[in-house]
Image (cartoon, rainbow, N blue to C red):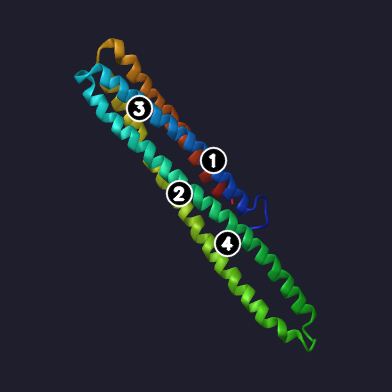
Amino acid sequence: MQNISQGRRPYYVTAAMVAAELNHTLASCKEINLTASNAQAASSRIGSAALGFKALTHYIDELAGYTKRAANEINQLAKEASKLATRTARTATALHYFHAARDKASTAAYAYSMAGAIETTEEHYAKLESDFNQVLSKMQVQLLDLKQNLRSANALASICRVEACRVDGRFQTIFVDVANKVDTVAAQIRERVDTAIRLFDSH
């Protein structure tokens, strides 16, 4: 693992920044949910002419639900990674001082007494480092999965526009607005996810 506590930006800072980006996506998910609810209400008012569109609102809801769950899961991982990175950095500092003390006292009669503490600290550091890397790997995989799944938003928006053409002209604007909203919000979420991915790639 590299750059946990040194370099341009420590990993615990990156993890916190990722969490902040994903907090913004939760607000966007609420917008998608609200958009789906409005579309359902409009579909109900129009009746059978909007049945195709009404079915689409279910998928819009599913997309929002998935995105919210994924963002929450990644957010929790980011918080865990931040804590682990901080603990790992502190343990690395302690290990540095242990090694320095051992080297200075290498010829002293009591030098051997530090061996146990150093070994225990080294094992603890290795465990923290391993745990941190595992959490980091999970975060990166989930971010990429979320980005991949968000591509379905474009397809949903396109189908919404097709369905809008099938209803009375008075209601087309409502459904086109829904399609535009799905496109816009999904693009905002993708940008947040891309930013989070870039934060990791910058290390």
3 or 2: tag closer to the N-terminus:
3
Residue 21 circle label: 1
Position of 72 with respect to 88 (left or right) is left
4 or 2: tag closer to the N-terminus:
4
Instruction: Measure how far apart labels 1 and 2 are at the Cα level.
Output: 13 Å
Please, what is the three-letter code of the amino acid marked with disc 3? Ser
Please, what is the three-letter code of the amino acid marked with disc 1? Glu
Position of 64 with respect to 26 (left or right) is left
Name the residue located 53 percent from the left edge and 51 percent from the top edge.
Answer: 78
Q: Which residue is mark 2?
A: 73
Please, what is the three-letter code of the amino acid marked with disc 4? Met
Residue 17 x/y as whole percent = 59, 44
Q: Residues within 10 Å of mark 3 (few under 14, many from 20)?
A: some
Q: Quadrant of the N terminus?
A: bottom right
Q: Residues within 10 Å of mark 1 (few under 14, many from 20)?
A: many
Residue projecting furthest to the bottom = 109
| Residue contact at pointers 4 and 1, CB within 8 angstroms | no
Mark 2 lies on a secondary structure that is helix
1 or 3: tag closer to the N-terminus:
1
Of discs 4 and 2, which sits in the foreground? 2
Name the residue located 62 percent from the left edge and 63 percent from the top edge.
Answer: 88
Mark 3 lies on a secondary structure that is helix
Is residue 131 positioned above or below 19 on the image?
Answer: below
Name the residue located 55 percent from the left edge and 51 percent from the top edge.
Answer: 79
4 or 3: tag closer to the N-terminus:
4
Mark 1 lies on a secondary structure that is helix
